[in-house]
Image: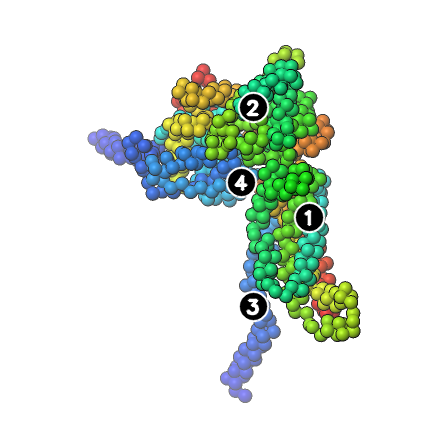
């Protein structure tokens, strides 16, 4: 009898407490279809930067939709791109809760994860997946942008892949085509190799008409390294590290690439001021019709296609990034990159704010809203958008974006990477100023070795996480979350 | 004398002594609040930074091993640090001398203005009323090689577009010129106020004796203004040493480090690269140099004041 009584008490207690335990695990989300607004009247603070146009368009298009659906007020702080990492690092180191959501570049996640300031998203997904669909990204992109090694910490706000924009009015002009044929003995076409790029660039470089061949970013170490790797390095076979974390910037391929990309012949085909060009200048030059071609990334698409922002919007075409012609195989090797920022949740905020932050991420940057953004701007980064027949018909470049996102190589995300990136970027800037590529790249390589050694990586035998390993991390994470992904089969 | 009187006397003597003591040291009561604030926001951070510079500290470091003077050695053998130090000295020398020359000239010429003085003074001080960030952004656009006003004017007189901020040979001096443009009004204001307080008698006597203007300037104006000049120079020197915002906005230290000042370099080392202890060592070195220069200038200044 006593035993039965105990069992009964336990049963009653468990029925009482089970819903409480379950309630801790799940939480309500905003749902535009049902009209649920569980966080109405709350505020969400976002540290952001609008350094690339897609982020500004997201802010303009997606945020009002989310605010309307949820009743949550979004409070933005837009910092300069170079100020964001210092801001987050100092806030995190102090355990600050100044921001609920933070803009985090793929190369910064390691530094911030080491500080313990990035909230893992697994439990939010398991409790309330909403419209987040993490499996709707390519594994390469997700592994680079949304994860810090094995941990899932962000929802990608964009997946940047290399793109090549050109002015169709110039390339389709019969007079230009005839003149090019006469000068070079071949048809004028969008360049597919580095040599063709230099040739077509020289053809269109006409300072008297304020027209130049193309332009790239040389202005900051971060920018110059990006364009060096995205548009040239990867296609030439340059990589960041070997498996033992030995930097590879002193290889023949890396030095050749530096000599070409930052060499004076190549620089002379770009508008004056090129040594200091950053994101804004190169975009404006193209948008103002000052250059015939523009090696960029997918984040530039909305601005380049916006007639209010670009006078050549109606005459802008997109093509794959020109590659390196391998003399041994005769094949054109393509450039590959997958990078970009994700919005991540500050680990130091209250549980309620974390749930509101997740509510924002799953909806404003979820599947349905991403489609709205792509439809309006031509910029997409989810598989469902990049492969949507209707959208692809409207924006044909989405197919090329998808292919690039599947094979892109991301930057290392080690805590010391920003410093290593700075070292190699500075060396490239010096090459652009006329320095000797071989010695500068070797010096930079040694500097990076010292940085890695300082971090104790060689002593501790830490090995480099390759892109394939990153994919494995993603697949393991998806399996843990009970998600299927074609690339993980 | 009974016991109670003795006690009263003793009490009186204690209170008298206390009164005299408080009178003798009462200045401490007045300066104590300021001193406490200084200790909290200046002295403590300096001591703390000095401590940090002797360890290896990053934002994420779990252990903080003592490394002695290693951070100082690393800084002093670091090419980027030395380049930034050189850039800073260049910046200080040319910016301070440039703004001083321009400000002094403006103040001297201003004395001869008879009408519309107030309006002219307002116009002259406009640059100093603007935030350095705004000044940097404004000049960035004015100097833009494709869209900028400066190149448009140069084009009118047949000079091709210049890329002042993109070239290593011109970026440094361009940033310095913008800094001079912003800060010469400070020198102008200080010297103009100083000149307004100079006694008239020596000038009248000199003019009666037919002393030429340049000699009046050299023998009367300059010596009497010397303390004011030193104050202006001191303010400008310390200010130029810690320049950060204009450079950050205009060039962000580029092209390839030619405009990177120590403040910018240390900021990057600490907050972007998370090398807190190395940045602390660099800032201590910077503090020592500024302290030394300021001490020399103060010594000179007080000697002048005492002599004056």
B296 vs A166: above or below: below
CA–CA distance in space, label 2 to label 3: 76 Å
Q: Which residue is mark 3?
A: B30
> Which chain does the numbered disc 3 sit on?
B
Q: Earlier in the sequence, mark 4 or mark 2?
A: 4
Q: Is residue B161 visible?
A: yes
Residue at image x 52%, y 81%? B7
Q: Of helix, strand and loop, which one carries label 4?
A: loop
Q: Earlier in the sequence, mark 3 or mark 1?
A: 3
Mark closer to the observer (1, 2):
2
Q: Residues within 10 Å of mark 1 (few under 14, many from 20)?
A: many
Question: Which part of the image, by quadrant, shows the N terminus of chain A?
Answer: top left
Q: Point out the residue furthest to the left here.
A: A1
The answer as to whether the residues below labels 1 and 2 share one chain is no
B201 vs A82: above or below: below
Front-most of residues B123 and A459: B123
CA–CA distance in space, label 3 to label 4: 43 Å
Q: Are marks 4 and 2 in contact (CB under 8 Å)?
A: no
Q: Which residue is mark 4?
A: A80
CA–CA distance in space, label 4 to label 1: 25 Å
CA–CA distance in space, label 3 to label 1: 39 Å
Occupied quadrant, residue A206? top right
Query: What is the number of the mark on residue A170?
Result: 2
Q: Of helix, strand and loop, which one carries label 3?
A: helix
> Which chain does the numbered disc 4 sit on?
A
Query: What is the number of the mark on residue B91?
Result: 1
> Which chain does the numbered disc 2 sit on?
A
Q: Residues within 10 Å of mark 4 (few under 14, many from 20)?
A: few
Q: Of helix, strand and loop, which one carries label 1?
A: helix
């Amino acid at each position: 009898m006593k035993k039965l009584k105990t069992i009964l008490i336990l049963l009653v207690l468990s029925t009482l407490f089970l819903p409480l335990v379950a309630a801790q695990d799940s939480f309500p989300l905003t749902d535009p279809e049902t009209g649920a607004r569980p966080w109405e009247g709350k505020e969400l603070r976002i540290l952001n930067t609008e350094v690339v146009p897609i982020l500004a368009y997201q802010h303009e298009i997606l945020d009002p939709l989310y605010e309307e659906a949820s009743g949550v007020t979004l409070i933005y702080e837009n910092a300069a791109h170079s100020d964001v990492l210092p801001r987050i690092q100092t806030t995190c180191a102090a355990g600050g809760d100044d921001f609920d959501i933070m803009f985090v570049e793929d190369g910064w996640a390691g530094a911030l994860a080491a500080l313990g300031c990035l909230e893992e998203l697994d439990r939010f997904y398991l409790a309330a997946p909403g419209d987040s669909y993490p499996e709707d990204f390519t594994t390469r992109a997700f592994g680079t942008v949304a994860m810090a090694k094995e941990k899932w910490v962000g929802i990608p706000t964009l997946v940047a892949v290399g793109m090549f924009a050109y002015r169709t009015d110039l390339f389709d002009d019969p007079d230009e085509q005839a003149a090019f044929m006469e000068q070079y003995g071949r048809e004028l076409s969008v360049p597919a190799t580095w040599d063709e790029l230099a040739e077509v660039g020289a053809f269109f470089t006409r300072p008297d008409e304020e027209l130049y061949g193309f332009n790239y970013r040389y202005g900051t170490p971060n920018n110059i390294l990006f364009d060096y790797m995205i548009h040239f390095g990867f296609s030439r076979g340059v990589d960041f590290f070997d498996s033992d974390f030995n930097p590879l910037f002193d290889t023949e391929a890396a030095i050749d690439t530096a000599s070409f990309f930052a060499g004076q012949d190549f620089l002379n085909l770009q508008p004056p001021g090129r040594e200091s060009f950053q994101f804004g200048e190169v975009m404006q030059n193209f948008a103002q019709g000052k250059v015939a071609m523009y090696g960029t990334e997918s984040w530039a698409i909305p601005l380049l296609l916006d007639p209010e922002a670009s006078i050549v919007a109606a005459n802008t075409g997109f093509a794959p990034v020109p590659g390196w012609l391998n003399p041994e195989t005769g094949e054109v090797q393509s450039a590959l990159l997958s990078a970009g920022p994700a919005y991540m949740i500050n680990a130091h905020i209250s549980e309620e704010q974390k749930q509101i932050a997740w509510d924002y991420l799953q909806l404003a940057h979820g599947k349905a809203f991403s489609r709205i953004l792509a439809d309006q701007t031509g910029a997409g980064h989810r598989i469902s958008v990049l492969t949507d027949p209707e959208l692809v018909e409207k924006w044909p470049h989405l197919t090329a974006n998808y292919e690039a996102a599947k094979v892109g190589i991301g930057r290392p995300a080690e805590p010391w990477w920003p410093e290593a990136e700075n070292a190699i970027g500075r060396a490239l800037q010096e090459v652009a100023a006329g320095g000797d590529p071989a010695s500068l790249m070797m010096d930079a390589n040694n500097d990076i070795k010292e940085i890695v050694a300082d971090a104790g990586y060689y002593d501790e035998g830490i090995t480099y996480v390759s892109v394939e390993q990153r994919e494995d991390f993603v697949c393991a994470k998806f399996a843990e979350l009970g998600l299927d992904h074609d690339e993980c089969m | 004398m009974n016991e109670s009187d003795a006690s009263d006397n003793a009490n009186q003597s204690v209170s008298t002594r206390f009164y005299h003591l408080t009178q003798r040291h009462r200045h401490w009561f007045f300066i104590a609040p300021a001193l406490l604030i200084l200790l909290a926001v200046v002295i403590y951070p300096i001591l703390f930074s000095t401590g940090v510079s002797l360890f290896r500290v990053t934002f994420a470091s779990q252990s903080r091993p003592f490394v002695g003077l290693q951070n100082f050695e690393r800084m002093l053998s670091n090419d980027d640090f030395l380049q930034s130090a050189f850039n800073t000295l260049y910046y200080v020398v040319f910016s301070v001398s440039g703004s001083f020359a321009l400000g002094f000239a403006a103040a001297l010429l201003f004395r001869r203005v008879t009408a519309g003085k107030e309006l002219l003074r307002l116009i002259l001080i406009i640059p100093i009323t603007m935030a350095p960030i705004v000044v940097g952004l404004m000049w960035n656009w004015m100097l833009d090689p494709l869209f900028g006003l400066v190149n448009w004017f140069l084009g009118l007189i047949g000079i091709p577009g210049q890329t002042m901020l993109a070239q290593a040979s011109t970026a440094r001096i361009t940033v310095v010129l913008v800094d001079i443009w912003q800060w010469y009004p400070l020198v102008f204001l200080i010297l103009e106020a100083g000149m307004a307080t100079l006694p008239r008698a020596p000038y009248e006597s000199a003019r009666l004796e037919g002393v030429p203007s340049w000699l009046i300037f050299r023998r009367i104006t300059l010596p009497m203004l010397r303390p004011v000049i030193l104050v202006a120079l001191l303010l400008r020197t310390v200010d130029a040493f810690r320049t950060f915002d204009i450079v950050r906005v205009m060039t962000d230290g580029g092209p390839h480090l030619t405009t990177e000042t120590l403040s910018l370099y240390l900021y990057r080392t600490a907050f972007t690269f998370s090398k807190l202890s190395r940045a602390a060592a660099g800032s201590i070195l910077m503090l020592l140099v500024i302290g030394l220069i300021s001490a020399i200038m103060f010594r000179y200044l007080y000697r002048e004041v005492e002599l004056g």
